[in-house]
Image (cartoon, grey):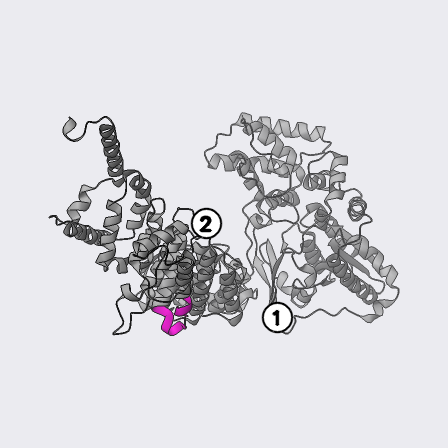
Amino acid sequence: MTVTFIGVRHHSPACARLVAATIDALRPAYVLIEGPADLNERIGELLLGHELPVAVFSSYRDGERRHGSWAPFCAYSPEWVALTHGRAVGAELKFIDLPAWHPAFAGLSNRYADAELRYADVMQRLCGSFGVDNVDVLWDHLFEIAADDELAERLAVYFDLVRGESAAGESDTAREAYMAQWVRAAAAEAGERPVVVVTGGFHRPALVSAPAAAGDSAAAGWPEVPTLPPDAVGGSFLVPYSFRRLDAFDGYQSGMPSPGYYQELWESGPQAAARHLTESVAGRLRERKQPVSTADLIAARVTAEGLAAVRGHRHPARTDVLDGLASALVSEALDVPLPWAARGTLRTGSHPVVVEMVAALSGTRVGRLHPDTPAPPLVHHVNAELERLGLDGPDDLELDLTVAADRARSQVLHRVRVLAVPGFRRDSGPATGLDPVLKERWTLRPSPERLTTFIEAGAYGATLADACAAVLAERATRAGRDVDLLAGVLFDAALSGTADVSEQTLTAIETTVAAAADLGALGRMLAVVLTMWRHDRILGTAHSATLAVVIVAAVRRILWLAEGVQGRSAAADLGRIGALAACRDALRYGRPQLSLDLTAALEVAARLAADGDAPPDLRGAAFGLRWALQPPPPAGDPPESASAPLEFEGDAPESVGASLESAGAPLDSVSAAAAVREAESGLGRPDPMRAVRGAFHPESAGDWLAGLFALAREEVLHTPAVIGLLDELLSGMAADDFLVAVPGLRQAFEFFPPREREIIAGRLLERRGLGGTGRGLLRGVTDPELVAAGMLLDDRVDAVLRREGLTGGNA
């Protein structure tokens, strides 16, 4: 019995050559490959005759965890070569690793992530010893452009150094113990025939020592393949892959960067790969109208050959060619280091020529599955839906959401959009539940990556509606405390016809709202959700149970947050004002169906309106909330002025006194503390006249009024006495005070639309017994701040005249 272990670096042409040569020479009985053992019954699917690259996509989902991972293959992947050459010599093929959904792969999105990259200290020492920048350059230097002489021995030494004496983590230990069981079983089954084991080089030392330590335990037979837990859903399917997704410069964290270059290296050797790389870069740059002369290419080639000689390379390596091209084609100073000097994605600020060079190395190859390849149910359902609705080809659509047929097409397109399928782009349409947009424009363009995305989305459900609902549920769960994200989820649910969600998702939504800390974001979300709940029969969200839960939770949270806001800053915050306005609307229009507690809300508003430490805009909004929602008095009740408690809306005890004094109460008869208690009790009806007087301080009046007008605009408009009082107070302000108050006042009165501002202006004219119209008065005031500045100047001139005795009859 002979077991040959080959440790490989994934997606390495050198390792692929070694695997092919070993299998062809030994003609083993078994070829064991690092790969998901639950796919052993379906290895034939891999060998149908696909156009590479392809990948095995595996998914897993249960009540607590969702996991997706890929095991990609290209022509020069050692695992792929092991499959194809093993089949060619008649060997039995076995994947021997744990299934991709196993907890050992938690946090690992790619099965073929190079384990040595997790041991940075070892790699740093090796790179330092050889004077290279990173592990990719080191690998090329040692293996890809070196001679194949004694390649197996050199690889073994390299991986022994990488593994060293360090103990593997729990994940690697579990995987290696499982793979060792397969090795022992295959060795027992093979008898005197050879067995070849192809795994990541990091695992090779552990597997080499495992069989000898295990004695004759191989008699136990083939290991049991783990099965999915009863409450879990998952599976594995082949998907088309692309060189772009394989490229480390594009975020792929395994194997080799620049897959286009290594494909050429695999097919033609290092000398031809270097020449092809230069030609690809030159061609790509010329396509983009970048000047690349023959002299530039000659200089690049000479530089690359010189660098190769200095670095001890038989042929120019990938970085030799890239450094030569950069030297010849980039004349400016670089803001960031050359990307091949380190491992990872392209950094922001990379030179445009360098970006094109990296893209040329990546290649444009996209895989294609054989027509007989099984696909998840979602793929078949989506194809049927798109074909049924005429959405399966290129098109430019305009959909009218008031038309049932167009609305059905829109919902399917939005479900596809939620799954992030390329080639389906919405150019215009409703952006929130507040805008009255009833038409959508879509651009449909079939994309080579469409099938891949649908296969991967198959992990979420067997139908488009189920998959969309699962994605939205996941987004809702991940929203955390971000209410804006949650609002986007809810609106996408409405657009896609997924109005109601599971209990688990509903709990996640409630948790997000209950933990939200941004009053403005909560208010924006509540306004949108309430509108959809009240009106949206087109999207099917009217009286949705899901939205009802959100409304109740949002009202509760907004009132709780608002009462905790402190600070006497006079800066009006339109976000928090809008949040209370959304609460007002929810309490006004949703209270009968949603069982919202109006009494509790009014009590909160009363306390907030009386809180001298709260910002003025919030106090004004709280008073406006009370005024707008206070039930009308029963028939026969005395007038408000006789029954209402004293309202105080000040910043300090002085404002309490001002409020009492303005109400006609002697200051020595009622204490400020008693007024506070009375205001906070929420008893009685709000008195806007006293509240306005108490809040009218030059530095904060405009902000308090902004809150009042935002919440009780109609009440103010239909209470002439309040408008008269505002006229009286504004007219009595000194010029200095008016100049301080004008910016806030200007913002406050913007809550009235133009028509209502005309009404107010007309009433002011009537109050003064003047002719004209409100519109004419408004047109005569072009800049209130300029008028205020003029008034101030007049006051100063009058003061100087009085001081110099130049007034009256002394002239």
Residue on which the image places disc 1: 232
**From the viewer's perspective, is the residue at label 1 or at label 2 nearer?**
2
SS class, disc 2: loop
Amino acid type shown at disc 1: Ala
Relative to residue 758, is residue 358 drawn left or right? right
Would residue 194 be counted in the magenta stretch? no
Is disc 1 surrounded by few (<14), some (14 to 19) or many (20+) residues within 10 Å?
A: some
Identity of the residue furthest to the left in this view: 771
Residue 29 in sight from this viewpoint:
no
Q: Tell me which secondary structure the magenta stretch mostly adopts.
A: helix
Seen in the picture, residue 233 relative to 787 is either above or below; the reply is below
> Could you tell me how many numbered marks the image carries?
2
Identify the residue at horizontal 21%, vertical 42% (top origin). 781
Would residue 593 be counted in the magenta stretch? yes
Is disc 2 surrounded by few (<14), some (14 to 19) or many (20+) residues within 10 Å?
A: few
Seen in the picture, residue 465 relative to 447 is either above or below; the reply is below
Are the residues tagged 1 and 2 within 8 Å (C-beta)?
Answer: no
Quadrant the N terminus occupies: bottom right
Residue on which the image places disc 2: 567
Seen in the picture, residue 596 relative to 279 is either above or below; the reply is below
Q: Position of residue 590 (x, y in %)?
A: 37, 69
Amino acid type shown at disc 2: Gly
Relative to residue 403, is residue 84 drawn left or right? right
Q: Position of residue 214 (x, y in %)?
A: 86, 63
* Front position in the image: 579 or 348: 579
SS class, disc 1: loop
Q: CA distance from mark 1 to mark 2?
A: 51 Å
Q: Position of residue 269 (x, y in %)?
A: 67, 41
Identify the residue at horizontal 65%, vertical 56% (top origin). 108
Q: Start and end of the magenta stretch?
A: 589-601
